[in-house]
Image (cartoon, grey):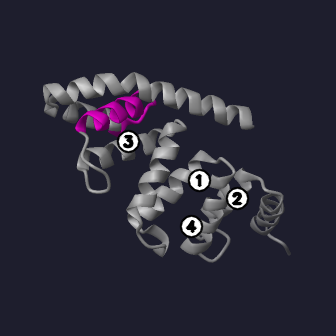
Amino acid sequence: GVTDTTKAKRLLEKSAGEGDAFALRVLGDLHFDGRGVRQSGTKAMDYYVKAWRKGDVEAGAQVAHMLYTGDGGVGVNQRVAFDGFRYAAEAGHPVAQRRLAVLYRGGRVVHRQPGLAHAWFTIAAESGDARAKDALRDTGSALSRDERVIAERELPKLRAKVEATLKRLAALR
């Protein structure tokens, strides 16, 4: 007989074929985890990219994570990962907001910007990311006066950008 997993996969593939971003992301999850299908980071990435192009923020964050870490054997491209984290962060994804802050704090992928990192940690913490709250305590005390000024100047701009992105995405739905 046909299993529930097989039925679900068929329905997801049908919806994905019709361009449904959620179905594309879920198929990516199935391939990434190897649930009901053969595990394949490459197939997962293909589905995530398609979902991301359709505006799925979670898929964008997953693409960024995979490219940053190389999870699923897709290779590492931290510059593209940075762009993915920025997209998802601006679209309100708390984990992506924290990861973007980490990139700004570390300065490996982009120029080190502690003030901007602090602003993103603040937004991620406000969005409920517990690890961002911890990082915020650590980074806040380490900021110079100039870096604190930058953080305070950038924070309202970033909040406005996130709000505008959320409104734009809501209008697309």
Indicate whether 83 appears above or below 113.
below
Inter-mark Cα distance, 1 to 4: 12 Å
Image: magenta residue range: 114-131
**What residue sits right under mark 2 in the picture?**
24
Tell me which corner region of the image, top left, top right, bottom left or bottom right, holds residue 51: bottom right
Disc 4 from disc 3: Cα separation = 22 Å
Q: Residues within 10 Å of mark 3 (few under 14, many from 20)?
A: many
Q: Is residue 66 visible?
A: yes
Query: Which amino acid, mark 1?
Result: Ala
Q: Is residue 23 left or right of residue 44?
A: right
- Label 4, residues with CA under 10 Å away: few <14, some 14-19, many ≥20: many
> Pointer 1: what residue?
59
Q: Which mark is residue 32?
A: 4
Instruction: Tell me which numbered mark, 2 or 4, is placed earlier along the sequence.
Output: 2
Amino acid type at image mark 2: Leu
- Compared across the picture, whether 11 is left or right of 101 comes to right
* Residue that numbered label 3 is attached to: 98
Residue at position x 50%, y 38% from top? Answer: 90
Q: How would you classify the magenta stretch by its main secondary structure? A: helix
Under mark 3, the amino acid is Arg
Q: Measured along the vertical axis of the image, is residue 39 above or below residue 8?
A: below
Q: Position of residue 171 (x, y in %)?
A: 72, 32
Mark 2 to mark 4: distance in Å?
Answer: 12 Å
Closer to the observer: label 1 or label 4? 1
Q: Secondary structure at mark 2?
A: helix
Give how far apart the Cα atoms at labels 2 and 3 are.
25 Å
For the residues marked 1 and 2, what is the alpha-carbon distance in whole angstroms? 9 Å
Q: CA distance from mark 3 to mark 1?
A: 16 Å
